[in-house]
Image (tube, rainbow, N blue to C red):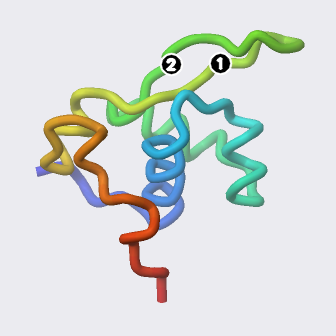
Amino acid sequence: APAKLSRAALETLAIVAYRQPIGRAQLEAIRGVACGEVLKTLLERRLVTVVGRAEELGRPMLYGTTKQFLDAFGLATLKDLPAEGELAPAE
């Protein structure tokens, strides 16, 4: 069983899953806080990987989910993720 993830890690992972490929600046704009350490943790746990580089100034890395992410959450493909409208708001 995968180790528990912090709320920040789960939020970041959800954003990556739904918006991939996504850059760190875009992640931070959505979350409103720095995501460097959280991304590092997700990379170490192999739930997120670098999938390429953006075609913009500085060529920032783009992140996406891994097969291990799908396995950890019992998904066959990304199409098995619930639609954004089906998700209940956090309380």
Report x, y in % for residue 1: 10, 51
Q: Earlier in the sequence, mark 1 or mark 2?
A: 2
For residue 36, which quarter of the picture? top right
Report x, y in % for residue 29: 78, 50
- Gap in angstroms between the C-alphas marked 1 and 2: 6 Å
Q: Secondary structure at mark 1?
A: strand
**Label number found at residue 36:** none
For residue 48, which quarter of the picture? top left
Q: What residue type is disc 2 on?
A: Val
Other-residue count near label 2 (Cα within 10 Å), few / some / many at <14 / 14–19 / ≥20: some
Does the residue at mark 1 contact the one at mark 2 (Cβ under 8 Å)? yes
Q: Residue furthest right?
A: 57
Q: What residue type is disc 1 on?
A: Met
Position of 48 relative to 80 (above/below): above
Residue bearing the label numbered 1: 61
Q: Secondary structure at mark 2?
A: strand
Q: Is residue 28 left or right of residue 38?
A: right
Q: Considering depth in this image, is 32 or 54 the residue closer to the camera? A: 54
**Residue at 45% over, 62% down:** 84
**Residue at 31% over, 59% down:** 82
For residue 70, which quarter of the picture? top left
Q: Residue furthest bottom?
A: 91
Q: Considering depth in this image, is 43 or 80 the residue closer to the camera? A: 80
Position of 49 relative to 81 (above/below): above
Q: How many marks?
A: 2
Residue bearing the label numbered 2: 50
Report x, y in % for residue 66: 32, 28
Q: Considering depth in this image, is 3 or 32 the residue closer to the camera? A: 32
**Residue at 61% over, 32% down:** 22
Other-residue count near label 1 (Cα within 10 Å), few / some / many at <14 / 14–19 / ≥20: some
